[in-house]
């Protein structure tokens, strides 16, 4: 069977070899022709004769490039022939000198060059083919001498300067004329082979000297133009005209001679067929002459018709040949198509035969190997099951380890919060201010903050591992943001005499960033910089705007740097550089990279005379998803927002501090009358924290501040008061805020419209300040009564159809979600906020405003109510209840239970 397969393979190789041999045998001689003839008729005649000759030689692949009398283009065409490695180049130079270098380049490249018609300024070419232009000049002079019967005065019209035919024709013409003293060239006009170049100078000469017998032009076109000029002056019959070319075309030399315009023309043969023959001899390295001269004759009235007839017959024969060649090419294409089809069919037959043989062999081979594969497959399955079991064990072990550290981190936060609260109280205590003890207390506070950040980093690491972070980007002035973060390090920089600077050319530049996450990036990078930069060193932040819609934020220090071979590992979790002898968790830079990548940016590191971290962020928000973009007001408190972690965490320390220190209620006055705003601000500032808006940013301001009461005018700049009230009441974040409308419109319709838009109080101008004060107090009192109702009936809130407002619906929905997840220990404040479609900060503010306690306490109360039910059911012991409801320890559960119900769980259970 193996012999059969080998035989089949040999058949395939042979068939491929035959095809490749056919392809190789089809290689042709590549001939490049750079055409530069100065007239269309000459170009057509030259191209026609060389194409006919090429069609008779199937081994030739002819490429014609027409430079259209452009020297630069002709040089480019020849350069292209050289780069394409043609076999032979035929060149008809436009001018001699510019073409010399490129012809010599071709010779150096090993490509033979045939110069046609005009020579170059060098002998470094293979061969030359063309008429003898010196002899043409001589023939013209002899013709004039032999036919002259007049004054013997002659005007010579030459071709363009730099053209070898023009120079040689003038040379030959002058040689014969100078031998006969009766004849004299009185004027020479330097044309450019075109007729228009002759008319103006010739007219001037003929007006000055009309006694001219002959005009000799270097081509028939200039001769015709000279005749037309003489005709204008009435001298066309007096002067005789001689040209050069003798083309058999319309207005060609032969037609002009027959028509009596020219007295004679010198035939200048194109030599297209001779050029191709000579090029093939050069390719085959046959012996040839360096200079190959084409014969010429004078065409006048005596032989013009005979030569015309001969040329017509030649043209007809060429057309017949071209027609036959076309038919032959059609036949060749048909033959090639059929031949290819036969080859293809033969090839497929060989393949089919081979596949048939191979399929028989494969069937036998597969049946043998099938059993072997089944055994191997079973072994792989067993090994895979073992690997999955080991992977599951490792995963559970890692999960348990992470859960331990995460739980421990949460447990640390409560005592740290207490420590920091008492320390802050001590710092503000007048008794220790100004004493030596204050510095020690501040040191405790500083290290407590540091410990809190380390704990938060550990929690962030867990969130990154579980992919729980979501970007909440808002438009932020990056310079102001950077300045705010730097303020935390100014004291350290001053104490250690570190040059700490920020540079930014565009201080109003805005980027979409998550302020909370980016604050952590800044803090990690700056903490490392200060940790490893010696005293009297330098730390610099630079913000640079790039042209590719990116912004680079560079953090550069003059510290110890990082070894070059360790740079790739810097962003790995738990990595510590070999030259780092300081305490470090090793997750700060890892978290920084993750947070930057959440912004669709990148962070890079260079270490040379210190470290330079570069954070690259994109401008605009096109790279962000709609879910990753939030209002600016939602992100303003994001730096503190990240401290609200889950239901076992205490509420953000900074937010709690603000609420405890601020005993005044907040008022937002939406009014575009500046004087009225000033009046209200003066009168109400002693009792309330007063903010104001002219109406253009009323919604944004309300979202940002979340005031206790809003006082709003009706006629405003952008939206009217009704529209603002309606929008605020529809938004869950602001629906609980009482709104007082101040307006001059006192009619019934206006009042009704205000009430329909959700307004709580409608006061008309002019209003009594005491009435306004009482209205504000009354609304706040009613809000407190409603809060009291919710607080005392929070677990018995009925559906909104009975009570009928948005807060009740919100509380009901929130309680339903908490009750559904009360036994889920992983359920967090973040999860609750996500299900309610609000941010964590907004959830905190909403719950605080409605029921007067923070969301963590409320969730704990729900859990404790559930715990009481479980204690009544007597199906679980106290420890089981504590752990099932997410409490960290039974002791903590017992303390919380006693704080709420006044007795311990054990006493509660015994009392049942």
Image (tube, grey):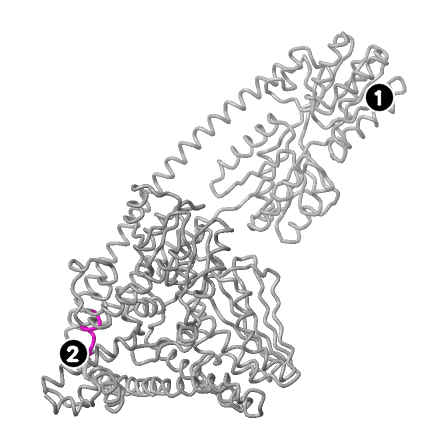
Name the one closer to the observer, 413 or 720. 720
Name the one closer to the observer, 98 or 871. 871
Query: Which residue is labeled 2 in the image?
Result: 374
Mark 2 secondary-structure assignment: helix
User: In the figure, residue 554 lies in which quadrant?
Assistant: bottom right
Give the total number of marks visible in the rendering. Answer: 2
Answer yes or no: is residue 600 visible: no
Query: Which residue is labeled 1 in the image?
Result: 187
Mark 1 secondary-structure assignment: strand
Name the one closer to the observer, 782 or 727. 782
Query: Relative to 707, is 798 on the left or the right?
Result: left
Answer yes or no: is residue 449 visible: yes
Magenta part of the chain: 817-823
Among the two numbered marks 2 and 1 on one chain, the one whose residue lies closer to the N terminus: 1
**Residue 222 lies within the magenta run:** no
Question: Could you tell me which quadrant the N terminus lies in?
Answer: bottom left
**Disc nearest the viewer among 2 and 1:** 2
**Residue 818 lies within the magenta run:** yes
Q: Which residue is found at the position 47% from the left and 63% from the top?
A: 685
Measured along the vertical axis of the image, is residue 7 above or below residue 429?
above
């Amino acid at each position: 069977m193996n012999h059969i397969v080998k035989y089949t393979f040999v058949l395939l190789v042979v068939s491929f070899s035959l095809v490749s041999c056919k392809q190789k045998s089809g290689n042709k001689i590549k001939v490049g022709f750079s055409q530069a003839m100065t007239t269309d008729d000459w170009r057509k005649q030259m191209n026609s004769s060389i194409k006919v000759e090429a069609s008779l030689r199937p081994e030739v692949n002819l490429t014609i490039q027409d430079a259209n009398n452009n020297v630069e283009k002709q040089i480019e065409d020849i350069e292209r022939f050289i780069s394409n490695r043609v076999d032979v180049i035929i060149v008809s130079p436009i001018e001699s000198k510019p073409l010399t270098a490129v012809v010599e380049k071709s010779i150096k490249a090993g490509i033979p060059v045939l110069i046609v018609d005009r020579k170059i300024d060098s002998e470094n070419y293979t061969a030359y083919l063309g008429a003898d232009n010196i002899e043409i000049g001589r023939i013209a002079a002899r013709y004039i001498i032999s036919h002259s019967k007049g004054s013997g005065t002659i005007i010579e019209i030459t071709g363009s300067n730099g053209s070898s035919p023009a120079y040689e024709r003038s040379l030959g013409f002058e040689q014969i004329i100078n031998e006969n003293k009766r004849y004299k060239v009185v004027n020479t006009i330097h044309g450019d082979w075109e007729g228009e170049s002759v008319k103006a100078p010739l007219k001037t000469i003929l007006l000055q000297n009309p006694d001219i017998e002959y005009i000799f032009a270097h081509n028939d076109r200039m001769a015709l133009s000279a005749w037309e000029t003489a005709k204008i002056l009435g001298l066309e019959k007096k002067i005789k005209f001689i040209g050069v070319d003798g083309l058999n075309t319309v207005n060609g030399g032969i037609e002009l001679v027959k028509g009596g315009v020219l007295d004679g023309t010198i035939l200048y043969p194109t030599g297209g067929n001779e050029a191709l023959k000579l090029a093939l001899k050069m390719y085959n390295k046959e012996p040839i002459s360096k200079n190959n001269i084409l014969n010429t004759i004078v065409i006048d009235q005596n032989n013009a018709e005979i030569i015309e007839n001969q040329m017509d017959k030649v043209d007809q024969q060429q057309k017949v040949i071209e027609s036959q060649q076309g038919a032959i090419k059609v036949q060749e294409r048909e033959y090639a198509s059929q031949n290819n089809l036969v080859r293809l069919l033969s090839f497929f037959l060989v393949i089919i035969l081979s596949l048939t043989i191979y399929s028989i062999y494969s069937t036998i081979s597969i049946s043998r190997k099938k059993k072997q594969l089944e055994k191997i497959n079973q072994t792989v399955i067993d090994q895979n099951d073992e690997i999955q079991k080991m992977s599951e064990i490792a995963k559970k072990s890692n999960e348990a380890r992470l859960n331990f550290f995460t739980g421990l981190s949460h447990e640390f936060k409560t005592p740290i919060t207490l420590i920091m609260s008492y320390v802050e109280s001590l710092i503000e205590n007048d008794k220790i201010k100004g004493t030596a003890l204050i510095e020690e207390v501040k040191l405790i506070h500083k290290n407590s903050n540091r410990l809190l950040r380390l704990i938060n980093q550990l929690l962030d690491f867990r969130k990154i591992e579980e992919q729980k972070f979501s970007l909440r980007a808002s438009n932020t002035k990056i310079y102001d943001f950077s300045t705010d973060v730097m303020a935390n390090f100014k004291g350290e920089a001053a104490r250690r005499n570190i040059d700490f600077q920020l540079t930014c050319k565009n201080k109003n530049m805005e980027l979409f960033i998550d302020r909370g996450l980016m604050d952590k990036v800044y803090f990690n990078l700056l903490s490392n910089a200060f940790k490893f930069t010696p005293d009297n060193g330098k730390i610099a932040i630079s913000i640079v705007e790039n042209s590719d819609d990116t912004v680079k934020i560079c953090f550069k220090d003059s510290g110890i740097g990082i070894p070059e071979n360790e740079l790739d590992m810097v962003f790995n979790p738990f990595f510590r550089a070999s030259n780092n002898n300081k305490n470090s968790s090793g997750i700060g830079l890892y978290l920084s990279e993750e947070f930057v990548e959440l912004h669709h940016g990148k962070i890079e590191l260079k270490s040379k005379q210190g470290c330079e971290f570069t954070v690259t962020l994109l401008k605009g928000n096109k790279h962000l998803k709609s879910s990753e973009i939030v209002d600016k007001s939602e992100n303003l408190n994001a730096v503190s927002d990240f401290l609200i972690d889950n239901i076992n965490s205490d509420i953000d320390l900074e937010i709690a501090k603000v609420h405890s220190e601020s005993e005044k209620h907040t008022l937002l006055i939406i009014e575009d009358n500046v004087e009225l705003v000033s009046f209200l601000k003066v009168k109400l500032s002693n009792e309330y924290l007063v903010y104001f808006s002219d109406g253009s940013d009323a919604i944004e301001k309300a979202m940002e501040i979340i005031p206790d009461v809003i006082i709003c005018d009706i006629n405003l700049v952008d939206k009217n008061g009704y529209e603002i009230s309606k929008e605020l009441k529809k938004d869950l974040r602001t629906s609980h805020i009482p709104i007082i409308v101040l307006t001059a419109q006192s009619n019934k319709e206006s009042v009704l419209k205000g009430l329909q838009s959700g307004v709580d109080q409608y006061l008309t101008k002019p209003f009594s300040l005491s009435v306004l004060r009482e209205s504000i107090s009354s609304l706040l009192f009613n809000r407190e009564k409603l809060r009291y109702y919710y607080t005392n009936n929070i677990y018995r809130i009925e559906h909104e159809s009975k009570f009928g407002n948005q807060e009740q619906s919100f509380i009901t929905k929130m309680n339903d979600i908490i009750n559904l997840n009360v036994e889920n220990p992983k359920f967090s404040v973040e999860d609750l906020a996500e299900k309610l479609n609000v941010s964590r900060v907004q959830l905190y503010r909403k719950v605080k405003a409605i029921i007067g306690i923070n969301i963590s306490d409320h969730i704990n109360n729900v859990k404790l109510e559930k715990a009481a039910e479980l204690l009544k059911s007597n199906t679980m012991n106290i420890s089981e209840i504590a752990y099932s409801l997410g409490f960290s320890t039974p002791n903590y559960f017992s303390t919380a239970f006693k704080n709420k119900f006044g007795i311990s769980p054990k006493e509660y259970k015994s009392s049942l």
